[in-house]
Image: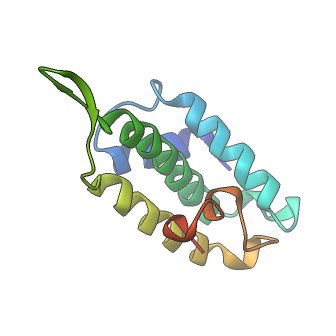
């Protein structure tokens, strides 16, 4: 896995030059992928860069969706029930990259896919 390539791909997904801002998410995604790997010999496979970028993008969208749930009103803050479309697309993108890397990964049930029926990524 190449951190610079992952950062470039992450910026491509977000559409902004924000890799340094979200570097901790990129680092976390690299750790998550290294834990999922069937074998450390396959850690140089190019597809893993895309998977890391997709995981980092998904994590950022989770954070942003959590922030957006609160709407400021005259009476204070209240929860919004609208769907965050970037978050929904990030889940689909992550599912696709998990499929692409399926032969490199040791298990199918990851932390981010086991929260609830709605959050099922696999």
Of residues 53 and 41, the one drawn nearer to the viewer in this rendering: 53
Tell me the quarter of the picture where residue 107 sits.
bottom right
Name the spot of residue 28 as percent of width and height, x first: 66, 39
Name the spot of residue 58 as percent of width and height, x first: 48, 51
Q: Residue at x 75, y 72 (%)?
A: 104
Q: Residue at x 36, y 51 (%)?
A: 13
Q: Would you say 101 lies left or right of 14 here?
A: right
What is the count of numbered marks? Answer: 0
Of residues 117 and 50, the one drawn nearer to the viewer in this rendering: 117
Q: Residue at x 81, y 54 (%)?
A: 35
Tell me the quarter of the picture where residue 31 sits.
top right
Quarter placement of the C terminus: bottom right
Name the spot of residue 91 as percent of width and height, x first: 45, 62
Q: Would you say 52 lies left or right of 15 here?
A: right
Of residues 30 and 92, the one drawn nearer to the viewer in this rendering: 92
Q: Residue 84, relative to residue 74: is it above or below? A: below
Q: Residue at x 49, y 68 (%)?
A: 118
Name the spot of residue 113 as percent of width and height, x first: 62, 64
Q: Residue 101, relative to residue 46: is it above or below? A: below
Q: Residue furthest front?
A: 75
């Amino acid at each position: 896995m190449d951190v610079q390539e992952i950062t470039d791909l992450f910026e491509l997904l977000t559409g902004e030059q924000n890799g340094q801002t979200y570097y901790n998410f990129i680092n976390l995604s690299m750790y998550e992928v290294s834990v999922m790997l069937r074998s450390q010999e396959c850690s140089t496979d190019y597809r893993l860069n895309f998977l890391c970028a997709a995981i980092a993008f998904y994590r950022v969208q989770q954070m942003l969706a959590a922030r957006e749930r609160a709407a400021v009103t005259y009476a204070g803050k209240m929860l919004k029930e609208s769907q965050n479309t970037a978050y929904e697309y990030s889940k689909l993108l992550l599912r696709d990259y998990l499929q692409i890397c399926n032969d490199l990964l040791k298990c199918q049930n990851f932390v981010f896919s086991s929260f609830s029926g709605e959050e099922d990524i696999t």
